[in-house]
Image (tube, rainbow, N blue to C red):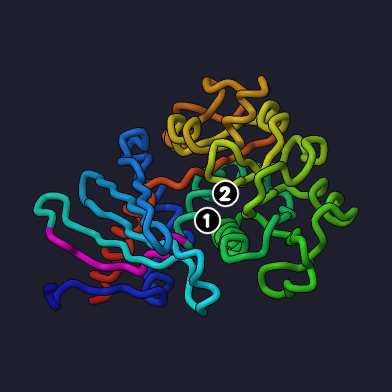
Amino acid sequence: MSAGIPFLDASDVEALLTPTAAVDALRCALAGGFRPETDHARIFEQLDGGEFLLMPAETATSTGIKVLTIAPDNPARGLARIQGLYVLFDSATLSPRALIDGPALTDIRTSAVSVAAIRDALERDAGTLDIVVFGAGPQARAHVRTVRAVLEGTRLVGSVTSVVRSPARVTTGADFDAVVAAGSEEAVAATRAAGLILCTTTASTPLFEDDVVRDDAVVVAVGSHSPDARELPGALLGRSDVIVEDIGAALRECGDVVLAIDEGHLAADDLIPMGDLVRGSRGLRGGRPVVFKSAGMSWEDLVLAQAIADADGRRG
């Protein structure tokens, strides 16, 4: 491989792409006309020791593929469960431009997509925003940090409460003001009071009841990635404006959406593609919750990989 092709590790990713810049890059791609329904399909391949996840994508200016390995036994070996690389290519020549740490790119992408989708909903209210986060892992923390960064100077973030199964294992600090047990009275009360509810768990059944969610709340669900698992109750989606990255992807992969439709709470025509929202061809109705259900799509990694490579080029 040419010595001129840079490798950008996790520290480079953090230095080159701020959360706000990541959100802006995704919204700019959609505002510029990129259509998520044209995205390439993700490819899963079974291996003896785990699984390959391949995520190819292309835009008008770049082409790329994220190659990840998922090794369930790695944590017992003291190694990361998910490892891999992003390979960015020039779209015209298909020449390699950069190699980027895959998990680091994924970490910043997931929260940036969520906030890109809900930014309009968060900015429609100037009041203090109290947050409840179901989960306390990297994505829970990344979502809180991205929300804080994007709202800085426009809306005050109040209390941030993490809801987990084992509160003793989680410390408060920069990301969480309080940590409470799932199912406790404290968790229910915090959820009722929250203007933003972030769901970042591996749950396969709803984390809370529909009636604890305020009519003006914004809810994000990123944890489940199969059509038979969900974090949210169907009734909540039925009374909400539901934003998705792409309707086809949501109907294939997002159990929160699929099961709500199966139960009669929701119709596919009710779904709002985030691209339509960003471009202004669809709007939020108001007076009801806003839900964003994320599938995670290949184009999102490509847009951010290009932004990272461009920033690396500018720093010389």
From this viewpoint, is residue 285 visible? yes
Q: Quadrant of the N terminus?
A: bottom left
The boundaries of the magenta stretch are: 95-106
Q: Quadrant of the C terminus?
A: bottom left
Label 2, residues with CA under 10 Å away: few <14, some 14-19, many ≥20? many
Tell me: 28 left or right of 259.
left
Instruction: Give the image quarter of residue 95.
Output: bottom left
Where 295 sits versus 280, above or below?
Answer: below
Question: Residue sitting at 57 percent across and 30 percent down?
Answer: 258
Q: Amino acid at mark 1?
A: Ser
Coordinates of residue 189 in the picture (x, y in percent): 86, 51
Tell me: 288 left or right of 78.
right
Question: Residue sitting at 48 percent across and 76 percent down?
Answer: 79
> Extreme left residue here?
93
> Extreme front residue here?
48
Residue that carries the numbered disc 1 in the rendered image: 111
Tell me: 63 left or right of 258.
left
Coordinates of residue 27 in the picture (x, y in percent): 42, 46
